[in-house]
Structures are given as structure tokens and as C-alpha cells.
Image (cartoon, rainbow, N blue to C red):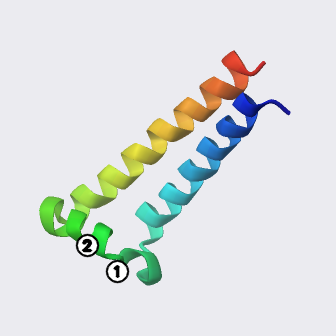
Amino acid sequence: MTTVQMIGIGCIVYFALCAIVAGLQPPMVWKIAKIQAFVSLLGETGARLLIGGVGVAAGAAGVWLLFFVGG
């Protein structure tokens, strides 16, 4: 397994974690100060969209790395 493939898998795992946090809002994670700063700045929906959007971008980068670069 190459380094590029490992980074791609890491990006896809990060996407899964972001999707879980944005979708389920587990209290243990949602009460972290950084996420609460996002909530106070962007609102509840905006924070969920930001976390989900970053996750989708990471997942897309991971798929690109796995299938088109790491081959």
C-alpha cells in the first residue's frame, strides 16, 4: 500500500466521521469549544453544513487519491 493510498483512505475515514458528527450531533463531540464557536457564529444549521461540507470535500479528495492517483 502506497502513501497516497493511505492518505486517501484517511480522507474517506475523515468523511465518515464528519458525516456522523454532522448527522447525529453526539453530545460528547458537539459540546467541544471549537464546534460551539461554529454554532454561535453560523447557527446550528450552518455549523452542520460546514462540518458536512468539509467532510464531503475530504471524501472526494480521498476517492480521487485512491482511484486516479494511487492506482
Left or right: 9 as drawn, with respect to 15: right
Name the element at disc 2.
helix
The residue carrying mark 2 is: 36
Q: Residues within 10 Å of mark 1 (few under 14, many from 20)?
A: few
Sort mark 2 into few (<14), some (14-19) or many (20+) by Cα contacts within 10 Å: some
Query: In the figure, residue 30 lies in which quadrant?
Result: bottom left
Task: Give the structural element (helix, strand or loop) at label 1.
Answer: loop
**Position above or below: 34 against 3:** below
Image quarter (top left, top right, bottom left or bottom right) of the C terminus:
top right
In space, the residues marked 1 and 2 are separated at their CA atoms by 6 Å
Which residue is labeled 1 in the image?
31
Which quadrant of the figure has residue 5? top right
Picture layout, residue 48 above or below residue 69: below
Q: Residue at x 23, y 63 (%)?
A: 38
Which quadrant of the structure image shows residue 36? bottom left
What x and y, as percent, mark residue 3? 74, 32
The N terminus appears in which quarter of the rendering?
A: top right
- The x and y percentages for residue 12 are 62, 44
Q: Amino acid at mark 2?
A: Gln
Q: Are marks 1 and 2 in contact (CB under 8 Å)?
A: yes
| Residue sitting at the far front | 3
**Amino acid type at image mark 1:** Lys
